[in-house]
Image (spheres, helix red, strand yellow):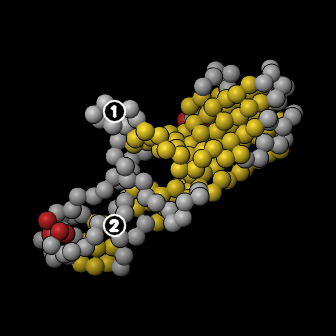
Amino acid sequence: MAPPQTLGPTTNFGASTLASDFGHADGMILFGAEQLAKDSANLALTRNGVGDWSLNRIAAGAETYNVRAQFLHVRRTGESMNAQLLTTGETLPAKGIAIRDIFALYDIGVVDLTTLTLRLGKTIYNASGVALTQTDIIAATAITKVVANLYRVTVAAATPFVYITDDFSALEIELVAVMANTGTIKVRGLGAHVNFNMT
């Protein structure tokens, strides 16, 4: 087996394991309308046109809808290296993803919404049967609720960005819309810009 080699920001620790010391700062995760969970059948998955799918609703009164995207992709929760690493005195680099900001893709029509908020939460499930714990990484934040074609970004408050490496945990983006009578909404997607270090 070849001895360890340093290749720029990447160190080869042997045993075919390649571990990057630095994360990438240009990641984006986007959940389309068909991937979003919703708490009401009133939000109907609709093909508005070519390449234009959304969860649509024409309000019949004051209505509240919750839509969420849960991060179900693979992410790093820490890395166990071979004994060779432990003899080098090096510290394991941060792994996983760090949320930079979250965003929603949506349209509002006819009349403004009463309220519209976007949040990022982290839920940790305890395998011993203890109740789950939920923490807001970005608390529910009011975003633009007026009639227009909109793309809005809510920037994460935490700086520097912290890598999410908790085991038995899940991240979720949640959009909550409180509609006015006759108002319309089309939710096209939820997503996040991220730093990531998977190698």
**In the image, 93: left or right of 67?**
left
Q: Residue at x 42, y 53 (%)?
A: 164
In three-dimensional space, the C-alpha distance between marks 1 and 2, rounded to whole angstroms, equals 30 Å
Q: What secondary structure is found at the residue carrying circle 2? A: loop
**In the image, 139: left or right of 11?**
right
Q: Residue at x 59, y 58 (%)?
A: 157
Q: Quadrant of the C terminus?
A: bottom left
Q: Residue at x 28, y 79 (%)?
A: 6
* Residue 161 seen in render: yes
The percent coordinates of residue 155 (x first, y second) are: 63, 57
82 lies above or below 2: above
The percent coordinates of residue 142 (x first, y second) are: 71, 45
Q: Which residue is mark 2?
A: 93
The percent coordinates of residue 20 (x first, y second) are: 35, 68
**In the image, 109: left or right of 4?**
right
Q: Amino acid at mark 2?
A: Pro
Indicate the quadrant where residue 186 lies: top right
25 lies above or below 183: below
Q: Residue furthest right?
A: 110
Q: Which residue is mark 1?
A: 130
Q: Earlier in the sequence, mark 1 or mark 2?
A: 2
Q: What secondary structure is found at the residue carrying circle 1? A: loop
Q: Residue at x 40, y 61 (%)?
A: 197
Report crowding for label 2: few under 14, some 14 to 19, many 20 or more residues within 10 A (C-alpha). some
- From the viewer's side, name the closer residue of 52 and 146: 146
Which disc, if any, is residue 168?
none
